[in-house]
């Protein structure tokens, strides 16, 4: 696995991480994931290893998210600080998330740990489909049961 340098500029670091993700892409993994509605081709164990090496990096997480690449967005969700996001930023991120895995990780790894979780849950649940009702935060927060 390639080591990502941390001494270059932020743009260099982003390019190196993106190149590392591209090098890890496996057509067989993409094929399996496409059957589930996901478009990434990176083994999630390898993705988690990159995140572990990078540690928490909010600035890099935002840059990775902005690429629009699903593997980069999953990595962003692993290296971000959930409490550092504002409610409007989380709302925008969920609306931009196009694949089930990115939506799931965003809600479970970031939004639920955010101080904005309850407000966003209420707002998303009030959205007409395909808005919030299908986004995962429509569950009753006490029981975890999806509201009708």
Image (cartoon, rainbow, N blue to C red):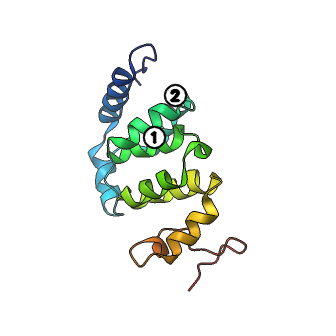
State if disc 1 and disc 2 touch (CB < 8 Å).
Answer: yes
Q: Residue furthest top?
A: 7
Q: Residue furthest bottom?
A: 148
Q: Label 2, label 1: how many angstroms apart (C-alpha)?
A: 10 Å
Dot 1 falls on a residue whose secondary structure is: helix
Above or below, 145 relative to 57:
below
Q: Residue at x 36, y 28 (%)?
A: 14
Q: Residue at x 50, y 70 (%)?
A: 124
| Residue 102 in view here | no
Q: Residue at x 41, y 45 (%)?
A: 73
| Residue 74 in view here | yes
Q: Which residue bears the numbered disc 2?
A: 54
Dot 2 falls on a residue whose secondary structure is: helix
**Crowd class of label 2 (few under 14; some 14 to 19; many from 20; radius 10 Å):** some
Q: Which residue bears the numbered disc 1?
A: 75
**Crowd class of label 1 (few under 14; some 14 to 19; many from 20; radius 10 Å):** many
Q: Position of residue 66 (x, y in %)?
A: 35, 42
Horizontal relation, residue 103 to residue 35: left or right: right
Q: Position of residue 4 (x, y in %)?
A: 42, 21
Tell me where residue 80 sits by quadrant. Answer: top right
Above or below, 36 relative to 31:
below
Horizontal relation, residue 125 to residue 5: left or right: right
Q: Residue furthest right?
A: 142
Please state which of residues 22 and 58 is positioned toward the viewer in this rendering.
Answer: 58
Horizontal relation, residue 66 to residue 122: left or right: left
Q: Earlier in the sequence, mark 2 or mark 1?
A: 2
Q: Position of residue 51 (x, y in %)?
A: 51, 34
Above or below, 26 relative to 115:
above
- Tell me the quadrant of the picture where the C terminus can be found: bottom right
Q: Position of residue 6 (x, y in %)?
A: 46, 17
Q: Residue at x 45, y 40 (%)?
A: 75
């Amino acid at each position: 696995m390639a080591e990502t340098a941390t001494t270059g500029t932020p743009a260099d670091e982003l390019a190196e991480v993106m190149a590392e993700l591209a090098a890890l892409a496996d057509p067989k993994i993409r094929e399996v994931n496409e059957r589930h509605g996901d478009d990434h081709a990176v083994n999630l164990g390898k993705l988690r290893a990159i995140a572990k090496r990078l540690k928490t990096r909010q600035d890099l997480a935002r840059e990775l998210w902005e690429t629009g690449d699903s593997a980069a967005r999953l990595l962003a969700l692993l290296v971000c600080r959930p409490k550092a996001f504002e409610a409007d930023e989380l709302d925008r991120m969920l609306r931009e998330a196009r694949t089930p895995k990115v939506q799931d990780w965003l809600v479970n790894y970031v939004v639920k740990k955010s101080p904005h979780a309850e407000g966003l849950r209420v707002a998303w649940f009030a959205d007409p489909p395909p808005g919030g009702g299908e986004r995962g935060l429509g569950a009753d927060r006490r029981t975890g049961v999806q509201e009708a």
